[in-house]
Amino acid sequence: MLSLNCSSCGATVNFHSKASVFAVCSFCKSTLVRHDMNLEAVGEMADLQDDWSPFQIGSQGVFDGKKFELVGRLRIAYSAGFWNEWFAWFDGERTAWLAEAQGFLALCFSSDTIAPNKDTLQPGKALTLAGQTFRVDDMRKVSCLFSEGELPVNAIKDRRSLSVDLRGPSDTMATIEYPVRSTISGVADEQPRVFVGKYKDFDEFKFKNLRKLDGW
Ligand SMILES: [Zn+2]
């Protein structure tokens, strides 16, 4: 684990994953971009209102027999609501995203498959990604509403993208994220990112260190 100091308040900011390039200081809430061993403060994150998630930074789970820990979170907003994407870190540098939306959970891994041109996509269209057949379920303009912990993307508030959800046979799923050109200085343009994974039931993850919710 890499431990650096917040450039605003000096508090320790831990990076479990070498892939993490962004963090929110848990003390002063500065948003920090990591340049190798240096952190640059680029803004401040407001507190999250009405957090209904049972998860928190430090929650642990199991996927395919391997333990992971949630080390970061994005709250993603779209026109009709929002969902959480938790950045999951496995021992040995593997990382994944746990998507938490309206009572379902999916864990997906980054794929080096080239994303199709977004102009060729529409709901219902079938396509092959990473050797599997998927069908486009939904296409939504989204923005980052909140972030915390460490993340492999520049998760500045209002970061915008087009999110395409795809479903495959059995419980397989995929997501493609097409970043919208950023107007925020210091944020490099990013390539579309493809993730492939599976829907699973809550109990299958054998979660530990969950957040205590009022009324539970
Ligand atoms: Zn700080």
Image: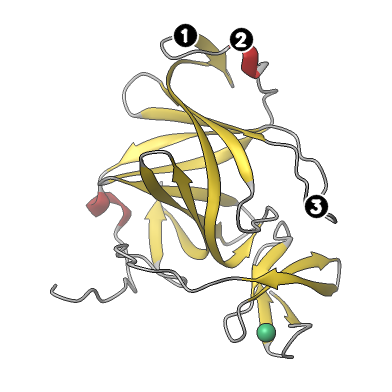
- Residue that lies at the very extreme toward the left in this rendered image: 215
Q: How is the image coloured?
A: secondary structure
Furthest-bottom residue in this view = 10
Secondary structure under tag 3 reads loop
State the image coordinates of residue 28 (x, y, percent, origin top left).
Answer: 62, 85
Give the label on residue 125, or none: 1
Distance of mark 1 from mark 3, alpha carbons? Answer: 32 Å
Q: At label 2, which amino acid type do we have?
A: Thr
Tag 2 and tag 1, C-beta contact below 8 Å: yes
Q: Look at 80% across and 52% down and name the residue there.
A: 187
Most foreground residue, 15 or 74: 74
Q: Position of residue 8 (x, y in %)?
A: 75, 85
Circle 2 residue: 120
| Quarter of the displayed picture in which ligand 1 can be seen | bottom right
Q: Quadrant of the N terminus?
A: bottom right
Is 60 drawn above or below residue 62 in the view shown? below
